[in-house]
Amino acid sequence: MKALTFQGIGDVKVTDVPKPAITGSGEALIKVTLGAVCGSDMHILHGHTPMNQGAVLGHEFVGVVEEVGSEVKRFKAGDRVVSSFFTSCGVCAFCRKGWFNQCVDKGTFGHGEYFGNLGGGQSEFVVVPLADHSMEPIPQGMTDEQAIFVGDILATGFFGAERAEIKPGDVVAVVGAGPVGLMATMCAQLFGPARVLVVDMVDSRLETAMDLGGIPINAKLVNPVEAIRASTGGFGADASIECVGLLTAVDTAVQAVRGGGTISMVGVPSTTIGDFPYMRMWLKSLTFRAGWCNVQAHMRPLLDLITAGRLTPDRIISHRMKLDQAEEAYRMFDAREATKIVLTP
Ligand SMILES: [Zn+2]
Ligand SMILES: [Zn+2]
């Protein structure tokens, strides 16, 4: 089958690899109908996330079940499904507490042997282990483009917004208008804020943020912290959602909130350690939350919100390409020439 594989830092290629097969009773073989390119793929491309040569890329995908193992109960051949970008068992101590992203059996798709040795979704087929707990059925009438982001970036945007503790009437600052920031902009509005301010430096992304109900702040033209303070009578935002991961963005998210406010960080950190403003956190009674998304907790409600028309994640798709063009898709996404790219095998 065709798949996008990692060849080395800065080098990915569409190659022919063996079609994966079910080897465990809890697994499902999925015929991929749509995959997506994600910011995390760029971390692999640039060598910030370790990856073995030849491994299949892609962790955002939807498809049709081709075959299931004997113990899979929720799915059968022919079902349309969306998968989380990671697997979870549903029965370990972490899963029983609802923290599926801490599962002892967790593996991440499209991240090679360092993260559970799973396959990837930028391919024609992928095996999903722990299928009953790692996938959700796609509701009838919902398109692949509507469903695909439930397994990663939409869930991440929701997770960030929920943990920002937004109250009706609040002012929220979203830092970063990449795909996750745009999802956070949309999800924040589910919690009833008066305004959602969105900080970025790329005009096209700020335009999309505006289309999704955000108020753009161009950090290329103004100091974002000052702009946020100026628009809140000098107080600052009630909550901020950090969607970049660079320490400068985290710093903006911390400085943007008023005393007693909450910072919710979902951007993948670009460094492992940095200065933490302990005194400021203490003086201003701030709450700081960080984490990568607990996807499996949110997939079902997010699918219901899309069905109801209250979330339209597919609106951020800027480019539709074939899997054969994946190398070019990576180049474009890396160069910020595309907001979000989906790939059809
Ligand atoms: Zn992703
Ligand atoms: Zn578990």
Image (cartoon, grey):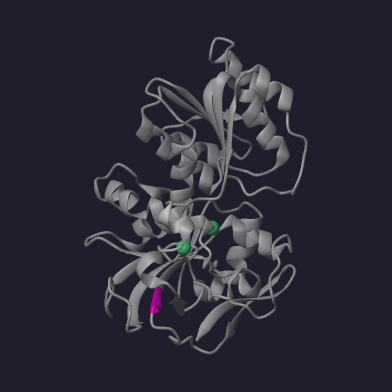
Work out whether residue 198 can be spotted.
no
Asked if the stretch drawn in magenta spans residue 27, the answer is yes
The residue located at (66%, 54%) in the rendering is 335
Q: Position of residue 209 (x, y in %)?
A: 48, 37
Q: Position of residue 93 (x, y in %)?
A: 47, 58
Q: Position of residue 319 (x, y in %)?
A: 49, 58
Q: Which residues are magenta?
A: 26-32
Residue occupying the far front of the picture: 93
Q: Which image quadrant for residue 170?
A: top left
Q: Position of residue 202 (x, y in %)?
A: 61, 40
Is 328 left or right of 301, judged from the image as shown? right
| Number of numbered tags placed on the structure image | 0
Q: Is residue 318 placed above or below 20 in the rendered structure?
A: above
Q: Is residue 216 placed above or below 30 in the rendered structure?
A: above
Between 325 and 14, the one nearer to me in the picture: 14
The chief SS type of the magenta part is: strand
Residue occupying the far top of the picture: 233
Q: Is residue 46 placed above or below 315 in the rendered structure?
A: below
Q: Which image quadrant for residue 280?
A: top right
Between 272 and 120, the one nearer to me in the picture: 272
Is 2 left or right of 299, judged from the image as shown? right
Q: Indicate the quadrant of ligand 1 in the picture.
A: bottom right
The residue located at (62%, 43%) in the rendering is 244
The residue located at (66%, 71%) in the rendering is 114
The residue located at (69%, 62%) in the rendering is 49
